[in-house]
Amino acid sequence: MEENVWAWVLQVLGRLHPLVVHFPIGLLVVALFLEVLTVKGKRSGLREGINWMIYIGTFFAVLATILGWLLRTFDDYSGELVQLHQNLGILTAVLSVITAFLLRQTVSGKLKNYLAYRSVLIVSVISLSITGHLGASLTHGEDFLSSALPGNRDSYDDSKAEALLAQLHQLDSLSETDLDDLNLEVRAIFAHNCYQCHSENKQKGELVLENKRGVFKGGESGAVIVAGKPKESEIYRRITLPPNADGVMPKKGKVLKDNEIALIRLWIEKGAHWSDRALKVFPEAPLALTKPDLPKSTGEEHPIDKLVTAYFEKNAVDWPQVVDDKTFIRRSYLDIVGLLPQPGSIDRFVTNLDPNKRSRLIDSLLNDTHNYTQHWLSFWNDLLRNDYSGTGFITGGRKQITDWLYKSLLENKPYDTMVKELVDPTPESEGFIKGIKWRGVVNASQRTEMQAAQNIGQSLMGVNVKCASCHNSFVSNLTLDQAYGFASIFADSVLELNRCDKPIGKMAKVNFLYPELGSVEADSLGERLSKLSELIVKPENGRLYRTITNRIWERLMGRGIIEPVDEMDNTPWDGALLDWLAADFIDSGHNLKQLIKTIMTSKTYQLPAVSYKKLEQIKSAQYVFNGPVIRRMSAEQFADAVSQIIAPAYYAAAYDPSGMDSSPNRIWHREIKSDRDVLPDPGKRYFRHTFSLARKEVVKADALISVDHSYAFYLNGQKVSMGTDWKKVDKLDVTNFLNPGKNTIAIEGTNEGNIANPAGILFRMKIHQEDNLETIVESGNGQDWKSTDVPPDKDWRDTAFDDGHWKAVRNYGSKHWDRLLDFKFGDSIPSFARASLVRQHPFMKALGRPSRENVATSRDDQATLLQALELTNGAYFNKVLEEGASSWLAEHDTNTENMVTSLYLKSLGRKPTKEEKGIMVATLGNSPDKEAVQDLFWATLLLPEFQFIY
């Protein structure tokens, strides 16, 4: 009797946990907020209140942990999620105690400042937040937060249950198929109403309803299903209790609908048959692809327009007028090559009377292969997680595929071939499926094999494998078994399944997500990849081709036919249009340029852009297409436009598509500390290189030089040039400085800064002598170049100087510097580096370019505070505008009217109105300075007319 008394007392105490747990949440979080207000000695009057909050919050954190342990021990909670919540709760309590202890030590003067206490307080609140989230997952389901997000709404339609019930009641007996349908619908009801409490992760009452074993095993009180006898089945009794009764299922205040209860009753009455067919809780798009017939008698010639006409008629939308020529040429240039059209090109296009001029313009832009490639490279880099620097590259745990990707786009490689080379890769394309090999211990879902499955699933197939790589997916029908089966294709050994990063003792079986396309089983990794590469590009795999078609449509139109573009099981706003485009894409030989042309030559693409007040209107399932969505320029488009109009935003690129005819490596004085090579210290260094020429007349000699940070260049004792910007290549005619025989290059280089930082010389000289004799002198790997950090004698620049005591330079490589596209002899060199070729940069990041540590299939079009600050007050952007102001002043001098007109024509494709010109000219004044011209640039570049694609 006494034992029973203690049991219920402890059980009651345990059930106080949800009440008590909110005290530390409120007290510690508010204490952290107030603590921030006291930083640097401010608001000292808050100190006593903060101290009491910490002490009381710590007490309740410990108490809540004890009561939580009682709740789990004496109530019916079990499962991995419960264990994780409990462990983090204990950790939070321990951290809170440490926080209170450090606070006490600080207040008593034993610690000098509040740094240690504040640091642990921050960690405590972070741990508290995670613990609280897990607690919410226990009470409301693991998808409690994610299910509220757009695209993750519960898509279960109870009308299916009602229709199935009506259908089955009309039958005298149920066939095997009928019983399967009945069971699958009952399991769908369980999935949408019961899994949050009765799954493998949370086994309340030791009952699991997400698999056959758990359903028929029952819970701690015994079996919940008695086949053929619903009234004797505990689960039926629970779901038929009044809404506020104790023990009602799913829970108080939330009960099943009458037709759902009737369906479960019928299922039990008919023997509780369990189907071997997979449960499809969420809708799935059909895998097969059939090209739909085009509507007849629509009055339109273009296939897309025929389909859209039928769509418009169905949705009572009238055809708008297409955009004018100026809008069309600007939109086409930005969409195909990512650049603004020149004023002359706009004039010629507008005055051209050819009725097919729009189609011809699209053809000419698509044939501008390098500009097309350099623009679309950003789209593919985002999609394929490819970048030039960042996480994984320093340690060799990541490999870029830039050269393969650039050449594939340049030659317009068929998409199916690209996919095959990504899935069964060559050394040039293997970086995609190899992913990032993280250092140290990583979560099981971040193994490189699982990354390959996740990336292929998301990028190529439009399916979310990430969720299913940790547990059965909450947003699709994918299971943990399927995710590991897919990942096993890329593994060289058998994978053990991990649920929420814990091994479950089950080994994965190799399988593709869509086994109906064929088997990928083989003895070796190479054979599996080869099979997968053939299987995934089959025409029967309509998902592959719908996904890329939808992505291209979204890129050109601002909104996909299916949204989000990574959730291809969602309902399209026009399925016939998507299927026709995908099937036509296959018929074209998987021609990406042809797909772009098909979309852009339609009247649908040429409709006026539509503005929406809220993003939710675009992403809504009730979206009705009225025309392209107004789009903001991408980070790369904006940077390139600035380079075209004002001054180069970038001079150097991480990838040079034309290739360098010399080594990109830079040399500098060798710096050694503690027997190790280190980065150069600030200060001056002196360099010499002596070489010999044939005893023939020097006909022509040119030199290229770039020094980080600044330099003075001498040749045979004579000063040739000086420079202070390594990004700008100095091109020098040195013919008159050279002599037949012995010559000496001397460079005084300066590394600026306050601490050690990269410095380097990049030098090349081409010398032509009589009889077509050519000699190349370059810094290369530093061979025969010498340096010193000791200021030498005045004659150190002369050939006769003895540099025998100088040291050999060090080759510092090229990793600290992008490649200067201008570091070439000749004139056919781009005036600026396209932003798509530049490694991640703070300016680009502020404008929305992703880090690409993960697949990035869409970018946020909404302006951010960071973007506004960068464009109005950013140092880097200001420097570009300052450089541009100098060049514009040199070109236009005081002719402010020409300056304003030229700026409008280059940036907006039109002349300024009389009012606009008057305001701008008056602002510049009669003798504009650089600051005034910069203000003119700012005012123009921040206009919506410039930043948006209409």
Image (cartoon, rainbow, N blue to C red):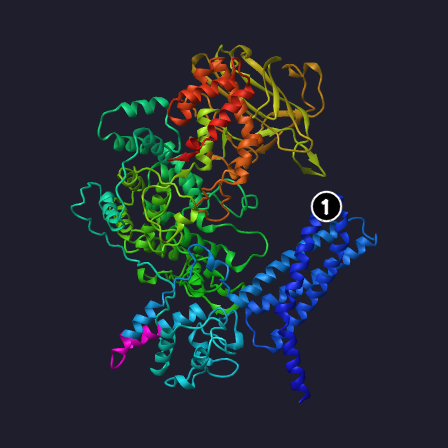
Give the x, y percent position of residue 476.
41, 61
Residue found farthest to the bottom:
1
Quadrant where the image shows the C terminus? top left
Instruction: Estimate how packed mark 1 is, as few (under 14), some (14 to 19) or many (20 or more) residues with alpha carbons within 10 Å.
Output: few
Q: Is residue 787 above or below residue 319?
A: above
Q: Is residue 518 left or right of residue 470?
A: left
Q: Is residue 57 above or below residue 176?
A: above
Q: Which residue is mark 1?
A: 39
Does residue 176 belong to the magenta stretch? yes
Tag count:
1
Residue 331 figure quarter:
top left
Give the x, y percent position of residue 74.
61, 78
Give the x, y percent position of residue 586.
27, 48
Q: Is residue 268 left or right of residue 480?
A: left
Residue located 65% across and 28% down the image = 669
Residue 525 figure quarter:
bottom left
Find the magenta span and give its range: 167-184
Majority SS type along the magenta span: helix
Residue 171 figure quarter:
bottom left
Residue found farthest to the right:
109
Residue located 46% across and 44% down the image = 860
Give the x, y percent position of residue 578.
29, 50
Quadrant where the image shows the N terminus? bottom right
Residue located 67% across and 51% down the image = 33
Give whichever of 271, 240 is nearer the camera.
240
Give whichever of 721, 142 is nearer the camera.
142
Q: Is residue 912 above or below residue 30?
A: above
Q: Is residue 396 visible?
A: yes
**Type of the residue with mark 1:** Val
